[in-house]
Amino acid sequence: MTHEKYWSAILSTNELSPLPDPHTASAAALIGDVVFCSSILPWATCGSEPAQPWRGSNLEEKTKAAVEPIKRLLKNQKAVWGGDWNRNLYGGWEHVGSQAMQDAIDSVVNSLGLCVATRELPHRLDCSHTIDHIAIPKVWIVDDARRVSAIGLSDHDLYFIEVQQTQIMRSMRSTEHLPAGTPSAWSLRSRHSPRQRSGAGDRGR
């Protein structure tokens, strides 16, 4: 990213309270009682400080340095975390990221009580899986999770999920990958559920 451009952002049609960025490549905000965090995570050729916001000598170290402050921010919070994580989380190694990187991501996801609703969705290249993710509380019910083509707009597609949180329906769209220079973004809309529900509940490559 160049001067006066941003790695990540959060957009909402509801009232939003900005929170301190947990990392240079992440943005956070409080919407209602949910903390949202949108992040870009490092990739194989991302470079290091001071030119780039990545600290460490290898991909695993850079990933841990990026996700640990996110973990501290989201700990004990009702949270949604997503963005371009530059690693598929399903299907083994698919020529991006590393297993050590995935282990670092999964460790934070699990410690926060989240699940990755986009884990098994396809990449734009049908032979692999998405590296763009949305993680939500495990108790939420996922009604829909899908990829929406953004060909002509970005080298990444849009990933959309619709979930239930008790009697509130919330839709979250990961729109991190718009044309160059456009901030990463989250979009959220809410509506009341028509019926009572119970139970448990890029930067491009």
Image: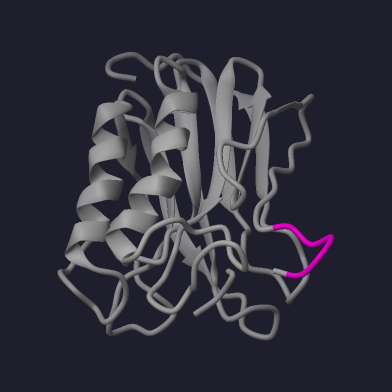
User: In this rendering, would 127 be left or right of 41?
Assistant: left
Q: Please say whether residue 23 is one of the residues in the magenta stretch.
A: no
Evaluate whether residue 141 shows in this view: yes
Q: Does 96 appear above or below 55?
A: below
Q: Residue visible at 73% across and 57% down?
A: 6
Q: Residue visible at 44% across and 48% down?
A: 66
User: In this rendering, would 60 be left or right of 32?
Assistant: left
Residue 97 picture location, percent across and down: 30, 70
Q: Which colour scheme is used?
A: one colour
98, 193: nearer the viewer: 98
Question: Where on the picture, by quarter, is residue 1?
Answer: bottom right
User: In this rendering, would 171 be left or right of 89?
Assistant: right
Q: Does 32 appear above or below 43?
A: above
> Which segment did they paint magenta?
2-6
Question: Where on the picture, by quarter, is residue 99?
Answer: bottom left
Q: Please say whether residue 5 is one of the residues in the magenta stretch.
A: yes
Q: Residue visible at 59% across and 15% down?
A: 33
Evaluate whether residue 193 shows in this view: no
Question: Where on the picture, by quarter, is residue 11?
Answer: top right
Residue 195 picture location, percent across and down: 49, 19
Residue furthest right as drawn: 4
29, 21: nearer the viewer: 21
71, 179: nearer the viewer: 71
Q: Does 60 appear above or below 9?
A: below
